[in-house]
Structures are given as structure tokens and as C-alpha cells.
Image (cartoon, rainbow, N blue to C red):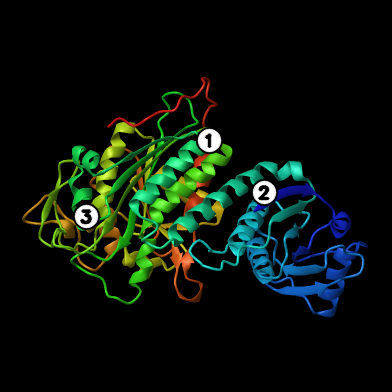
Amino acid sequence: MDFQLKTLDPARAAREKCDAIVLVVAQGFKPAKDPLTSLAGHALDAGDLEAKPGKLLHAYRSEGIAASRVILAGAGDGSARRVQSAVQAAVGALRSSGVKRLLICLPGEADEAAVRAAVTATAEASYVYVATKSKPEGREIERVTVAVDDAARVKDAFEAAKAAAAGIEFARELANLPPNHATPTRLGEEAKKLAKAHGFGCQVLGPKEIAKLGMGSFMAVAQGSEEPPRFIVLQHQGGADGEAPVVLVGKGITFDSGGISIKPAQDMDEMKFDMGGAASVLGTFRAIGELKPRVNVVGLIPSCENMPDGRSVKPGDIVKSMSGQTIEILNTDAEGRLILCDALSYAERFKPGAVIDIATLTGACMVALGGVRSGLFASDDMLAESLQSAGDAAMDLCWRMPLDDEYGDGLKTNFADVANVAGRAGGAITAAKFLQRFAGKFPWAHLDIAGTAWRSGANKGATGRPVGLLYQYLLSRQDSAPAPTKTRRRASARQ
């Protein structure tokens, strides 16, 4: 989808050549003499339109307006969140309508946040999955023009929103692929394509290389599947020489049967989404490729399947992690933390300024926070605050959860340094406490996206979260960092 930003007043917007116009109408709306705002003014006066978020009124072949379709979309107080709701509802209503060229007119007082919201909402509402359909009905909207009163004033926000939208869509597409398509090998191939297209450093390690690194915990999960594991390393060098990078670690379980501790059959198909963390890291790098922010970023993705087999790890088995810590595996369905812990140990070699792992980790987090906010755990208050602020700005919300030492007591075992599960109570927290044991050498945060990475039901599918949050966080670090003084060179991770 091609996004454009234009300075257009309502009178010029009414004359713009396009198939449909969405006019966002906020509270306090005052019509002028042009055909577009006059139409909205008459509808408000007649009570046919309300400026409440999500309220829509359709018009066809209105006099003086070049577009054949007009949607008047209520946006409440005109805040970014209300603009998001308005645009999402309007664009959703235009799906399968044949519209190819769309114009979205934002209120004159629309700020940078409202522009970001309009772009990302348009991309989300118009997304259609077609990759594995024999007769795909693709997205019809090809060009979207966002009209504002002063394009120069919001240009930077618009460009950042375009990049974020591209990354979110990339993550959604990967996560929506069936598990026989989105294998660990496929994720490695996608990483290589991103690297080639955008100049990233990239390594994709196979089973022998992973074993040589001493990643016994990761290999224990992978050993039950015939699909070979992959450990993916991506690097963007946009910051100054020697600047400590941000390391993003994404859980890449491309299908999770639960292993020997097998899951119930109902809804097991949704376990293809268990690589949502990996998809979000790749999606964030897709967004990075658009604007190449002035920050050093490393992406680490441990990827494998978790399958039941004669070679599968068993409850009661003890494995040795890359850190040297031994782990008693009490439940093979708690596998995400087993691959992440070795990736966290690997992250130490980059001497990172911050490490953020992203994982569809626990059903307990879904129970606690539902699908609205991702769970945020952090060992560093400043990192937690920065991520929370980034989530608020991107409207990709998270909520900080506790990490009291007492929560780790349930992970004690008589037979190893740590068990991979505790009891049912506080399950999202005890999972985070497990990961924290492997993240003591750098500022660390953990995002549990089990409730936010996908939706169930009639609208089943990946959401692309938390790409928006992660990308906004990287942009905030760029804004506080000095510009690089030397030409960047592609870096590669040491094995």
C-alpha cells in the first residue's frame, strides 16, 4: 500500500481525484462553505451523524465532491486513540468495495500522534491474508493520501508511521502462515532476505553450530522435531561506533504441541502463533529498514518446533544451559523459556545497553491482562518506563508486572539449579523470574505477548504486536543519542 501525505484544506480535498474520502469529524466540528464540511455539518444538524468514536455515515455521489463515496467518521475528542477508532471503522467499511484510491481528511488540529494513528489504523483495517488461498481476494486499496493542514509539521511522524505499518504487516503475515510453511528454516530465509534488502548483518546457525555454542536448553526443545532448529542473528549498525546496542530476543516456536506434556486438541492450531515474538523481531527489523534509525540493534531468534517424539525431552529430564546452569524440565510445554534463556546468555557478547525479550510465553498473562495490554517485566526502572511510554505513544499498550524475589521460590528443585515451572499461581511472573536468572549482566525487560500477539474467534489472526511499541522505543533512543561520526560497517556476531 502506498501512503502519501498532503497539505489539503477541505475545499481542495473535495476536488481531489480519488474513489473515496473519509472525513474525520471530531467534537466541536465547524463546517465551512466547501461541499465536504457542509455535508458533515448538515448531517450533524439533522442528527444523522454523531461525533462519537466509531460512528459512521455513508454518502454517495454528493454534489461538488469528486469522489463517488464519502464516509463521515466520528472521532470524539479528536485524540489519537479516537482517530484510530474512526479510521479503523471507516476503512473496514470500505473493504470489498472496489476502492483503490482513498483520501483521509484529518481535523485541522490533528497532531503527530493522530497522524500516526491514522496510518497504522488504515494498514490494520485493510490487511487481508491471501498467502495460502487458491483464489485470493487481495487488498483493494492501493493508495492512501492523508490530508492535513500542514504536511511539513507532521512529516517525520508520518514517515515513522509508514515504517511501523510496514513492519507490523510483515510480522502479521509471517505469524499467519501455517506451521508447515513458517518453519525455522523459513524464518532464517526471511531474515536473510531482510538483510540483503536493507544492509543488515545476518547469520543463521544450524543444529551443529547451536550445539557447539553449548545451548543445551535450546537443543533439548528442538530434539523432538524433524524440523532442524535455527538461531538467527540480525544486526543494524546505525549508531556511533562502540555504542552499546539494543538486543531484541524473539521466541520462535513455529509450532507448539506441548511436547510430551501435550496440549488439548481444541485450538491447538493457534499454536502456529507461538512464534509471535520472532515475527515481531523480524517485523521491527523490517521497519528499521525503512528509516534506518541512528541506533545499534541486534535481533536474536532461537527457532524450533516443540513436538512429541521418541527423542523428545521428558518431564524430569535435566539439561545444561549455555550459562552453565542446570534446568529440571518438569513440564515440556514450558518450552519458550528454555530456548530464550540460551539466547539471553548469547546476548552478553554484544555488551548491550538493553535486552528485551518478546514471547508468547504464558496463558497466565492472558488471564491477567487479556488482549489489551502486553505484560511487561523489567529489572531496570528506566527501561521499563521507556517501554511503557513507547507503548503509549504507539498505542501498543503494556503493563508493568512485579518481579519480587519471593516469586522465584517456586522454581527451586532438589535435582538441578532451577526448575522450568513453578505452581499455577502467578504463572506469568514465575516464568519471568526464570528468565531473569539468565539476564543479570545487562538491563533487561521481558514482554509477554501471549494475549496480544493474536486474536481468536471469527477474526482469528496475528496482530503484529508489539512491533509498534518496539519501533517507537528504538526511535526514542535515537532521539537521545548523538549522530554517528563514522561510516558504518556491517558487523557480524562472534560465534
Whether residue 70 is visible: yes
Labelled disc at residue 112: 2
Q: Nearer the viewer, residue 144 or 129?
A: 129
Against 388, residue 452 (above or below) is: below
Q: Secondary structure at mark 1?
A: helix
The residue indicated by pointer 3 is 221
- Residue 235's x, y, as percent? 42, 35
Indicate which disc, 1 or 3, sits on the residue closer to the N terminus: 3
Q: Nearer the viewer, residue 61 or 51?
A: 61
- Residue 37's x, y, as percent? 85, 64
Alpha-carbon neighbours of circle 2 within 10 Å: few (<14), some, or many (≥20)?
some
**In the rendered structure, are the residues bearing label 3 and label 2 in contact, judged by CB atoms less than 8 Å apart?**
no
Q: Secondary structure at mark 3?
A: helix
Against 97, residue 386 (above or below) is: above
Label 1, label 3: how many angstroms apart (C-alpha)? 37 Å
The residue indicated by pointer 1 is 478
Q: Nearer the viewer, residue 40 or 216?
A: 216
Label 1, label 2: how many angstroms apart (C-alpha)? 18 Å
Alpha-carbon neighbours of circle 3 within 10 Å: few (<14), some, or many (≥20)?
many
Q: Residue furthest front?
A: 134
Whether residue 404 is visible: no
- Residue 54's x, y, as percent? 66, 71
Residue drawn at point x = 57 percent, y = 41 percent: 290
Q: Nearer the viewer, mark 3 or mark 2?
A: 3
Give residue 19's quadrant in the image. Answer: bottom right
